[in-house]
Image: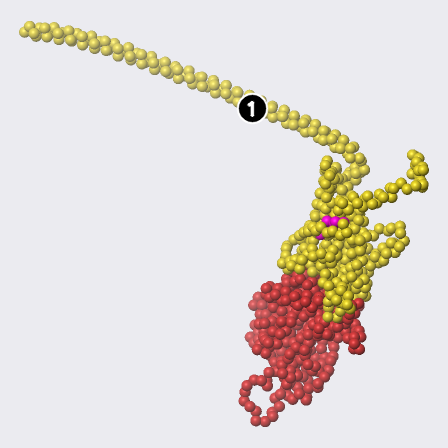
Amino acid sequence: MIERAESAVSGIAQRNLEGYVGFANLPNQVYRKSVKRGFEFTLMVVGESGLGKSTLINSLFLTDLYSKDYPGPSHRIKKTVQVEQSKVLIKEGGVQLTLTIVDTPGFGDAVDNSNCWQPVINYIDSKCEDFLNAESRVNRRLMPDNRVHCCLYFIAPSGHGLKPLDIEFMKRLHDKVNVIPLIAKADTLTPEECQFFKKQIMKEIQEHKIKIYEFPDTEDDEDNKLIRKIKDKMPLAVVGSNVVIEVNGRKVRGRQYPWGVAEVENGEHCDFTVLRNMLIRTHMQDLKDVTNNVHYENYRSKKLAAVTCNGIDATKAKGQLTKSPLAQMEEERREHVMKMKKMESEMEQVFEMKVKEKKQKLKDSEAELERRHEQMKKNLEAQYKELEEKRRQFEEEKSNWEAQQRLLEQQKLDASKTMEKNKKKGKIF
Amino acid sequence: MSEIVPPEVRPKPAVPAKPTGISSVHGSQGSGVGGQGAGGGSSLLGYIGIDTIIEQMRKKTMKTGFDFNIMVVGTSGLGKSTLVNTLFKSQVSRRSTGWSRDEKIPRTVEIKAVSHVIEEGGVKMKLTVIDTPGFGDQINNENCWDPISKYINEQYEKFLKEEVNIARKKRIPDTRVHCCLYFISPTGHSLRQLDTEFMKNLSRMVNIIPVIAKSDTLTVEEKIEFKQRVRKELEISGIEFYPQKEFDEDMEDKSDNDKIREAMPFAVVGSDKEYQVNGKRVLGRKTPWGVVEVENPIHCEFAQLRDFLIRSHLQDLKEVTHNIHYETYRAKRLNDNGGLHPISTAPSGDTQESNL
């Protein structure tokens, strides 16, 4: 018989079950669903060239992601830092993992390395933005998670401490992504040097208040002990290699020197196994969670706050961040409306003025026109008079001429008549 | 006449040297008079004693002692100080004066010169190690070699002023940089931009000897590949490192130097700690997988570098600096200036004696 939990107002009462219900199977269901879906993990590697990043990735995932013919930096001397990503799908025990490795060739290689971290920051932000947009869409079926879950930062094994470039980079990225600093090519250092170097680095990290990825404390004491051991070893000193060498009859992965073989998977030689276990076997999910809950949320709140209070100066913005977005929007709308009204009145004013001007101009031109009209009329009349005058003269002349013509004609008639008479007379002759 | 020479001063150099009869004085004396036995000329009817001049020179050198100035350049953490200490088997670098890493990396490249007088076999040498902390450590390393070239030119200037003086000192103190050890980071890929820029700018001013630092990071194959690549890049960029091809005087020099040039840049490891290996005490670095012996030629090329630098070419370095680099500087200065009163006779081999 199962006792029903009371819908108590205060707290949730814990009841003991008296039979097997079966929801203990829940983790299995989750497991099966996740396995079907597959996992994604994005790992970013940053560091100067020649620190063994590609070799380490190959060693971690036991694949040749970067083949031997992978062009070394000598072939890729670029002026700016590039960000390259390569995806690979690996399967193990029925679980498939889409692993994305993001590489940053050219980091720290130029003579002037100012702002060489900018492309990296831009890349991380763009991935977060993609996810934000995907989340805000109406149709959220397919939401690929391309955010960078972990950034392995490779420190050159100088044996002294961090370089200014290391400090700058980590300071700028520790609140955007999980940063795990590693000491590269650790077979350069003797154990004492390594210890000293690690302490120095941790001291400098604390001095500059850099927040590297911290392992969460679990409730289990045993696990806590292990975690403390890992914490003591930070930053991890790693050596990478995929070459198998035979040592005392065993086959191990390592690097062969004339004075011995540095084994990759030997805990006394380097911390590679610690890194691998931590990264893949125990804390991969935690890395993803921290990315989602902390870094992504930081990005999101910053981004959305920037969107809602655009144009408002910082001091006001701080107070308005606490308002709910709806009130924010109301206020914005009101402001907008006011602005519109103001603009309208202004425009009206301008309009009035323009109209007045135009009218004035029109009047002026009208007057002008009138004047001209008058003048033209006068001119016309004068011409008309002239013309009349001329016509009269002409008429006079005409009548004169006509009179003359008539006279001439008369004369001619007379002349012809007399000629006829003469002719008749002549004929009589 | 080898009986005059006490044996302990002349360990056989690892680099093939000239035949023993004459090489016995090759180590730290002027080689200007070294080739006397080989030259043709009239045969002598009896023993005159001309060859005792070598002995006379030796005595003089031992009395006056000589200077050697070596500069080490490279980004921090490459083991420069340790290597110099190992080279001269004594605490001669910055480290010895209690410098610790707690000091912040300087904002600009500083020049720190530390001088010591070391003695061996009656011969005194004033060794000056010039360190350049802050080189290549900043985020923006544009022109970080400017302080270095300024320093080198200043030393030439000082020497020039002394030389041009009317009342000259008998022995002008020589602070010019005779040799610059440039430390290449063992990335395993190729030279970095900073390396090529630096060497391009300075190879005409001073003798540059590139070395691959912390070479215990590279396996044997990686080392060979890296060296080849570095040499090729140096060739492509037109960087002439010491020993420069153009200054080989005769066939013998050329063949010796060719062998050295083939082996350069030397891949070195430095250490000032001693460990027990096979019953012997050796200088080395102890790692969980073995002990890297510094003087073992299979492990690294430190012994070669040391022999080359100290046991066979020390005097040559000084000579090239004086006869070539300094002369270039001087000619340029006199041409540009025109103000300094012209010195008609170029310094011949005789004045060179005063520098020893």
Residue at the disc numbered 1: A361
State the image coordinates of residue B246 (x, y, percent, origin top left).
Answer: 57, 72
Letter of the chain in yellow: A
Q: Nearer the viewer, residue B162 or B7?
A: B7
The answer to which quarter of the image holds residue A354 is: top right
| Residue B355 shows in this picture | no
State the image coordinates of residue A36 (x, y, percent, origin top left).
Answer: 76, 45
Numbered range of the magenta stretch: A95-101
Q: Chain B appears in which tint?
A: red
Q: Amino acid at mark 1?
A: Lys
Q: Nearer the viewer, residue A283 or B246?
A: A283
Q: How many marks?
A: 1
Identify the residue shown where x is 13% and y is 8%.
Answer: A419
Identify the residue shown where x is 68% and y is 86%.
Answer: B5
Identify the residue shown where x is 53% and y is 22%.
Answer: A365
Quarter of the N terminus of chain B within the rendering: bottom right
Asked which secondary structure carries label 1, the reply is helix
The answer to which quarter of the image holds residue B132 is: bottom right
Is residue A60 rendered to the left or right of residue B265? Answer: right
**Magenta stretch holds residue A224:** no
State the image coordinates of residue A204 (x, y, percent, origin top left).
Answer: 80, 57
Is residue A229 rendered to the left or right of residue B253? Answer: right
Work out which residue is located at the far left of the displayed protein and give it: A429
Identify the residue shown where x is 70% and y is 27%.
Answer: A341
Placement of B105 over or under B285, stated as above or below? above
State the image coordinates of residue B8 (x, y, percent, origin top left).
Answer: 72, 84
Q: Label the magenta part by its dominant secondary structure.
A: strand
Quarter of the C terminus of chain B within the rendering: bottom right
